[in-house]
Image (spheres, helix red, strand yellow):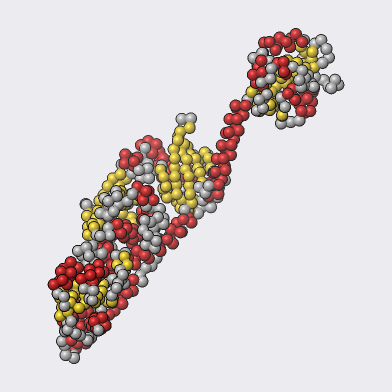
Amino acid sequence: MPHRQIPQRTATTTELDAIERILDGATVIAHSFDGIISHWTIGCENTYGWTRAEAIGKPVFDLLETRANQPREDIVERLHHAGVWEGELIHRHKAGHDVHVASRCVAVRLADSDAFTIIQTNNDISAQKKAQDDLAAREAHLRSILETVPEAMIVIDDHGIVISFSPGAEKLFAMKAQDICGRNVSNLMPNPDRDAHDRYLEHYIETGERRIIGYGRVVTALRADGTKFPVELHVGETSVNGQRIFTGFIRDLTSRLKIEDDLRQAQKMEAVGQLTGGIAHDFNNLLTVISGNLEMIEAKLAPGPVLELIGEAQGAAADGAKLTSQLLAFGRRQPLNPKLSDLGQLVSGFSDLLRRTLGENIDLRTVINGSQHNVLVDGSQLQNALLNIALNARDAMSRGGTLTTEISRVHLDADYAKMYPQLRTGDFVLISVTDTGTGMTDDVKEHAFEPFFTTKGAGAGTGLGLSMVYGFVKQSGGHVQIYSEVDHGTTIRIYLPWVKVDTQATPEKIERPAIRETLPGGSETILVVEDDPRVRRVSVSRLLDMGYAVIEAGDAQEALTLLKQNPQVALLFTDIVMPGGMLGDELAKEARILRPDIHVLFTSGYAEPVVGGRDFVINGSWLKKPYTAKELATRIRELLD
């Protein structure tokens, strides 16, 4: 295009040859506007694989299959207009792979003619280009992850200033990144956490004691509109260019806590059912004694005022029997209501109820070290947590064992917290619950606190007990840990923050019950097996009054011995739950081996023939305590006749 004005840069052919020799190691190409190559350096041979002989005289655009981010005509136009063009090109190597270059083209007029030549210097940037592409891909991948995962990510410096706020965080906090970046992260927290945050951060940096660094801490967050919501916070720490930065991953717990609340209610109902079954058992034993003695007194009294008083007492006992039935349906929703309590008093007051729930083959021990075990806790929820732990321990001690609950004050220092990143330092009250059961494998321990995880058979448990213990303890600002070895038992430790205040716990109240009257009799021999001597005396007296011959035993082993010695026994009348390692249904099986023709009548203070977490296959008649003399007499005659 001779009509265009190109800046005056001139060179002779000799000068071009000299340039080629001087810059032979560089990637320099000289070619005409039509692209015909006139000079090709050793650097070009190294970069593109074509020798000088193969390249000279070839069109550069065809030889190297040049690709640019703008049309070739525009590049030529630029050279005609300005004499210089710079940009990035993609060339094809002789071996077939791409070579990315940063190119500079200068148009030079040949001194001995009106022709122009283009001197093109190329720098191979393939490695840099690949690194840039890899970096861009990683950044795109990271952005994709951050925009997809439900967790929000916030990065702060060692002064608490937000330096990165992910799209997930924008959505979670209803706040744009530009509105929070450069401000203190405490703006995302309600008080008192807002005022305390920087102090905690400074304390950690100075001492290494963890207050906010670690895994899975449940905290309260603050949205832009002022609403508060629960989140789970995971914080990591690193150093970039000598500056400490903290990365927090935040998960909204609103929905999960709602689900857990519903599950907690369901689990509570199951736990209350277990607890009230144990209470009903003891109440019904007491009612059996009361009502039985009232009946025998009534039979010996003539009509008059005293007999009327006996009748009123029996009416009250009957109401007590109804109460034990109502206990089985008991269970109401109790919101978390933390109050200052002394854990020593709280756990001691709960021990008697727990003992009834666990059954007589579990030795329950409570050890309280020191005093002033003050914590801020929901007493009923704590008792429910201990009940869940105790029921798991009972299942791990199917043949009986020892369950020990120990209360003590402990101080967790920075060294201890370093071993367990989820712990924070300070003074705690420790509740340590230890059983002598089968223990847990490492795999079971790893998943023990997960909701719905259970080692029990189908239908035998919900898998929610320990997960609710974990949630309750965390909600109360504490920690829970499991120590267990196979065949060596399990210890569950609950740490609750100690409060330096005097307090008193409110003791549990326990009620009372009773029953009614009449009788047909006989002369057969009956073996009565009952571990409670008061209940046994009432049963024996009733049967003697009905005319039966009675042999009595306090446990199953004694009963088997007496059965071998007395072949005339026609009926075995036995309690279900007894100490000594053999329960009522096992006694009945052994008795039928000795005496296939023997009749069996079972009784128990539990509400139904499901005791201590196991179903009893009752191949015989069932009589629930408390029972009247008439019910006892009628049931025995039904069996014997």
Quarter occupied by residue 581: bottom left
Camera-nearest residue between 28 and 479: 28
Examine the rendered structure and indicate whether residue 85 appears above or below residue 564: above
Examine the rendered structure and indicate whether residue 119 appears above or below residue 497: above
Residue 579 drawn at (x, y percent): 20, 65
- Report the residue that reaches farthest toward the right: 3
Quadrant of the frame with the C terminus? bottom left
Residue 573 seen in render? no
Residue 228 drawn at (x, y percent): 48, 53
- Determine the residue positioned at 32% across, 74% down: 325
Describe residue 211's horizontal placement relative to residue 10 as left or right.
Answer: left
- Report the residue that reaches farthest toward the bottom: 303
Describe residue 31's horizontal placement relative to residue 483 as left or right.
Answer: right
Residue 400 seen in render? yes
Describe residue 4's horizontal placement relative to residue 160 as left or right.
Answer: right
Examine the rendered structure and indicate whether residue 495 appears above or below residue 13: below
Quadrant of the frame with the N terminus? top right
Quarter occupied by residue 536: bottom left
Residue 307 drawn at (x, y percent): 19, 87
Describe residue 247's horizontal placement relative to residue 281 as left or right.
Answer: right
- Determine the residue positioned at 34% across, 63% down: 271
- Determine the residue positioned at 57% across, 40% down: 141
Camera-nearest residue between 503 and 517: 517
Residue 50 drawn at (x, y percent): 69, 20
- Determine the residue positioned at 32% across, 67% down: 615
- Report the residue that reaches farthest toward the left: 565
